[in-house]
Amino acid sequence: MQALTVEGLEKTYDNGFQALKGVSFSVESGEFFALLGPNGAGKSTTLGIVCGLVRKSSGRVSVCGDDLDQSPQAVRRHLGVVPQEFNFNSFEKVEQIVLNQAGYYGISRKEALPYCETLLKQLDLWEKRHTPARMLSGGMKRRLMIARALIHKPRVLILDEPTAGVDIEIRRSMWEFLQKLNQQGLTIILTTHYLEEAEAMCKRVAIISEGKIITNTSTKALLKQADKAYFVVDVTGTTESLPALSPFSIEVLDEHSFLVEVNKSISLNELFAVLNEKGINVASIRPEANRLESMFIDLVAESKQ
C-alpha cells in the first residue's frame, strides 16, 4: 500500500503567486523518504496541504488509502506531524503536553500514560517530565515535538526540518531513534537542509524546485548520477603552502586536511600518483560524507535554466 500519494498538486495564493505547479510523488509504506529543496521551493506548502493546514488549489492527496477531501479526519489520524516551529504551550509541563495531544485523538489519560512514559524515556525526556517546556533546551524541545507527534501511534510521521538548531550529538541520537522507528514499520517523510541526513537515512529522495518535482529516485541511483566524487585527505605535515594538484581541485579544510574533487573519469590511482609526486605524505583518505550536496546544487541550477 502507498503511505502517501500526491497527484497534480497545485497551489496559487490570492496574490497570484503559484507555489506548486503540478507536484506528484508517492511514498511506500515503511519507507524513509526525503523531500528536499531550497528555501521557497514548495516543500512546506506541499506538506502543509498533506496535513490539512494549507488549502490546495487543485490535485489529489491520499494517505494510507484515505482521500484528503473525502476523509480528512482519517488522514489526520494517520499522520504524526513535527513542524519546524515549536507550537506547544511553553508553560505546560512536558508530560502534560504529550498527554493533551493523546486526548485530541480520543485516547484517555490512563491509556496514554504507559506509552507516554515509553516515548519520554526513549527520547531522554523522562527526567524532565514535570518540567515546564520553556525550561528545556532547544534539542529537548525538538524531542518533545517528536514524542507529541507519536503519542497516537500514527502510521506516517512527517518531520519538517526536525534537527534545525540541534547540536551534532543530539542530532545523531535523533537519527538513531528515527531509524529504529522506521525499522519497526513506521513510514517517515523528512524535509531537511542537512543533506547528510537524507543520505544517511533515506532510501528515496525527491527534489522540488520552483514548485515542481525535478527528480524522484532512490538515494543510491541519485548518487550514481554524480560525475564527481569528493575525498577528505589528512596529511602528516601541514596544508600550509599546499601546491596545486592539477587536474584535481582542492579546498583546504584545516592545517592538516583538505578536500579534493575527483572527476569520475579519473581513477583514484591517479590522485595517489599526483600526491606522491608532490611529496605530500598522506595519513588517511576518506570519502566526504555529504555527497548529495553537489548533486542537489547541480540539479536545482539545471531546473532554473
Image (tube, grey):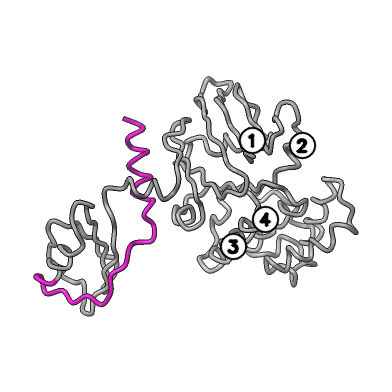
Considering only order in the chain, which callout, 4 or 2, is on the residue closer to the N terminus? 2
Q: In the image, residue 255 lies at what x, y percent?
A: 26, 73
**Looking at the image, is mark 1 or mark 2 earlier in the sequence?**
1
Eye-nearest disc, 2 or 4: 2
Residue 284 in magenta? Answer: yes
Q: Is residue 243 visible?
A: yes
Q: Position of residue 17 (x, y in %)?
A: 51, 24
**Residue highlighted by disc 1:** 50
The span from disc 4 to disc 3 (Cα, nearest Å) is 10 Å
Q: Residues within 10 Å of mark 4 (few under 14, many from 20)?
A: many
Query: Which of disc 3 and disc 2 is earlier in sequence?
Result: 2
Q: Which residue is mark 4?
A: 146
- Residue on which the image places disc 3: 174
- Disc 2 on helix, strand or loop? helix
Disc 1 residue type (three-letter): Val
Q: Are marks 3 and 1 in contact (CB under 8 Å)?
A: no
- Quarter in which the C terminus is drawn: top left
* Structural distance between the alpha carbons of marks 1 and 2: 12 Å
Magenta stretch in the rendered image? 276-305
Image spot of residue 209 (x, y percent): 43, 35
Contact, mark 4 vs mark 3 (Cβ under 8 Å): yes
Inspect the image, locate mark 4, and give the three-letter code of the amino acid beneath it.
Ile
In the rendered view, would you say 33 is above or below 125? above
* Mark 3 residue type: Met
What residue is disc 2 on? 74
Residue sitting at 28 percent across and 74 percent down?
A: 284
The numbered mark, 3 or 1, whose residue comes first in the sequence reads 1
Of labels 2 and 3, the one closer to you: 2
Tell me if mark 1 has few (under 14), some (14-19) or many (20+) residues whose alpha carbon lies within 10 angstroms of its own: many
Q: Front-most of 133 and 169?
A: 169
